[in-house]
Amino acid sequence: MTETYPTVRLIPKAEARAIRHGFPWVYANELVTDRRTRKLAPGTLAVLEDANRVAMGVVGVNPKSKIICRMLDSDPEAVIDEAWFAKRIARALAHRDRLYDAPFYRLAHAEADGLPGVVIDRFGDVAVVQPNAAWADALLGALAAALRSITGVTTVVMNGTGRARSLEGLEETMTVLEGKAPNGAVPVPMNGAMYMADVMGGQKTGLFFDQRPNHALAARLSRDGDVLDVFSHVGGFGLAALAGGAKSALAVDGSGPALELAAQGAAAMGVSDRFETRKGDAFDMLSALAEEGRRFDVVICDPPAFAPAKPALEAGLRAYERIARLAAPLVSDGGYLVLCSCSHAADLTRFRNASSRGIGRGGRRGQIIHTGFAGPDHPLLPHLAESGYLKALFYRL
């Protein structure tokens, strides 16, 4: 079978040792890009060779991407088919089955689960696939069939939207690969709360599973308190806080549909009388709440990525500092402020410095009681620091 694979070759100065030791990417300036290689269709499978023509494994090639090769299998004889996908998915599933009692989690976290560029979130009988690499886009049929056979899901949705696909030169599209599209939002139980995930039209796959452990800690801190959840999406921190015994929760977000789903979740939990929403720009809402003299026992700010890439880093750090400056005065004395970042470009140290500086500029002082990261269904590949994107700083002010 592999005799049909073309070959691509590293230039002499490329770091072949890193790839042999687990680094999953080859950049365009590390590969011999002759006319034959440039003519390969995005998503072509090939055998990668080092500069001495020694085979290193099977890769997915995309001449349109800065990441020109993604290592799929270190066995040069590997056949990338439905059976291959089934083995990778079964291995990922075994880990999640140890973690969770219910089938709601991130099933595959790209390179860390041996599926480069592929994200799969599971919502009971529905799985949402984000194929953010050309090789996976080309093999979607085999991926979807393996996913259905291994997990037993009845519906597989392809969410082909977002910045990662544009970097690969892939079109944006949303479609159902297996089964039927869900009728409305999918209920998702998590941390004692009930969330409503719009898997066909919401942000990302419809829900953010990565914050699960941070939701749980914030819920413990919120018991018998008033909570402000800014950039709440479908009620992530606020609904978890109410499930944990919070007296009240106010959810702020710029998306009306997301807040409607949050309200539906509160209704399903029977806590609508303790849940309030406000639609508007988060910065404006924080200023307005300060003018109203509002104070909260716990304030959480979980914004979108202000620094998704290095060119946006400085502006992003200023935005994180501003959020902290506006949020800190809203926290009652002895209360808690939780600041989150999902920016790849802003590492923990820079994010922590910007947040602490903002708290100081807001006239408050505090102690960091906990630093949170993504849950264990979002494993980290040690070779890719970028995959450790999520940071959550818990301050007591």
Image (cartoon, grey):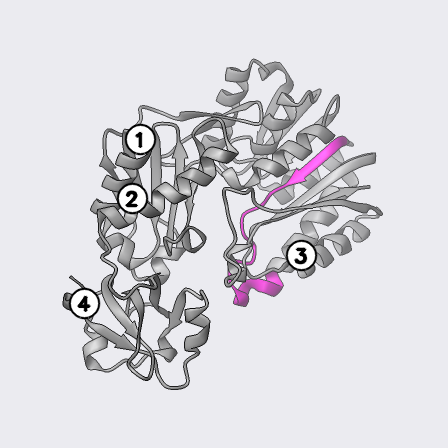
Q: Residue 64 in the image: state x and y as whole percent.
A: 29, 68
CA gap, disc 2 and disc 3: 39 Å
- Which residue is located at x 64 percent, y 38 percent? 285
Residue 74 vs residue 327, the one in the foreground: 74
Q: Choose top left, top right, bottom left or bottom right for residue 36.
A: bottom left
Residue that mark 4 sits on = 5
Left or right of 69, for residue 291: right
Q: Amino acid at mark 1?
A: Val
Residue that mark 3 sits on = 351
Residue 162 vs residue 252, the one in the foreground: 162
Disc 1 element? loop
Q: Sequence-wise, which precedes: disc 1 or disc 4?
A: 4
Image height check: is 189 above or below 333? above
CA gap, disc 3 and disc 1: 38 Å
Q: Amino acid at mark 2?
A: Ala
Q: Which mark is residue 86?
A: 2
Q: Which residues are drawn in magenta?
A: 296-315
Residue 160 visible from this viewpoint: no
Q: Sequence-wise, which precedes: disc 2 or disc 4?
A: 4
Left or right of 220, for residue 50: left
Determine contact: label 2, label 3, CB under 8 Å. Answer: no
For label 3, count other residues whose C-alpha is less than 10 Å away and answer few (under 14), some (14-19) or many (20+): many
